[in-house]
Image (tube, rainbow, N blue to C red):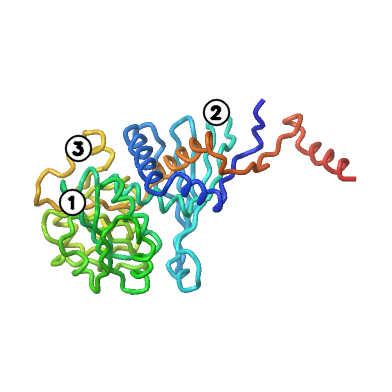
Amino acid sequence: MENLNIVPFVSVDNMMKLVLHLGPERVMTDLAGYIEADFRRWQSFDKTPRVASHSEVGVIELMPTSDGEMYGFKYVNGHPKNTKEGLQTVTAFGLLAEVNTGYPILLTEMTILTALRTAAMSALAARHLAPKGATVMAMIGNGAQAEFQALAFKAICGVNEVRLYDIDPAATAKCVRNLAGSGLALTACKTAEEAMEGAGIITTCTADKQCATILTDNMVGTGVHINAVGGDCPGKTELHRDILLRSSIFVEYPPQTRIEGEIQQLDPDHPVTELWQVITGAATGRSDPRQITLFDSVGFAIEDFSALRYIHDQLKALPYSEPLDMIADPDDPRDLYGMLLRAKAKAA
């Protein structure tokens, strides 16, 4: 009989081994497939905006969902000031459980996994929304997420050139160094405007927790796709409001995005389209070559659920986990205290 109190645990070290074994581009392509499959059964899921605890320096969030058979959640923080202290802006872990018993079946780091699934989600949305034949992407903000975004767009959307800009030239240099040998043509740019020259896809991914204007209206021409990643909590945006008013806006889950995304700048009834509807064919994505499409990405629990499912499935064939004695399992389920007494006697 399976020992249900032993839970597979994927440490940071094992997650890196798994990703390197399969290759980051394959992992993100696979993740996009899992996310798309779950978006196609969107109505099967419990859905709620993430539960957030905000402070002056950051946010700590829980992101739960269930499809009736499995339940998953992610714990994640966002602390922009951490970078100056030598810490990660975002850290995360996640858990997957069986609804039938309530027992967990996976515990895993999700700092690396979130970066992979965020990039996979961006590229999946762009595959449905970006102008056909777009092979050049501007990457505005070259922090921890930038390389993942670049590689995901290469693998999933066929991007072959990335034009990079960050207010910190060292971040851009880091990105160029890390992507050397990736097969991407890389250009380090001195301004956001320079990075956007010739780009059919524009990705913004900055970290400051403020209502910033990374892109102004006059910077954005017609016929582009904007992948807005950085605005992901109340009071944190990247795009001038006028850009939104010119764009066809696509979101994950409106009750969450209207609080956290770029569209927090707009009226509560401003029309948006849910991405799952585009994926299933229930709504139209890009309909005009001159259209500006905007994916207002904030990250949603179903995407993390997809990522947890993916890792759980990979562990069926790959050895990148360790057993974690996580659930108390007395001989008699009614005698939990007796389990303590037996442990005491054994230790004596």
Q: Nearer the viewer, mark 1 or mark 2?
A: 1
- Disc number placed over residue 26 in the picture, else none: none
Q: Read off the residue under disc 1.
A: 134
Which label's residue is closer to the chain start, 1 or 2? 2
Helix, strand or loop for disc 3: loop
In the rendered image, the residue lying farthest to the right is 348
Density class for disc 2 (Cα within 10 Å; few <14, some 14-19, many ≥20) is few
From the top left corner, tell me how far across and down residue 74 is, in percent: 48, 48
Q: CA distance from mark 3 to mark 1?
A: 22 Å
Q: Nearer the viewer, mark 3 or mark 1?
A: 1
Q: Read off the residue under disc 2.
A: 100
Name the foreground residue: 155 vs 120.
Answer: 155
Q: Read off the residue under disc 3.
A: 283
Name the foreground residue: 341 vs 214.
Answer: 214
Q: CA distance from mark 1 to mark 2?
A: 46 Å
Which label's residue is closer to the chain start, 3 or 2? 2
In this rendering, the answer to whether 121 lies above or below 181 is above
Helix, strand or loop for disc 1: loop
From the top left corner, tell me how far across and down residue 117 is, in percent: 39, 48
| Residue type of the residue flagged with mark 3 | Ala
Helix, strand or loop for disc 2: loop
Question: At 75% from the left edge and 34% from the top edge, which residue is drawn?
Answer: 330
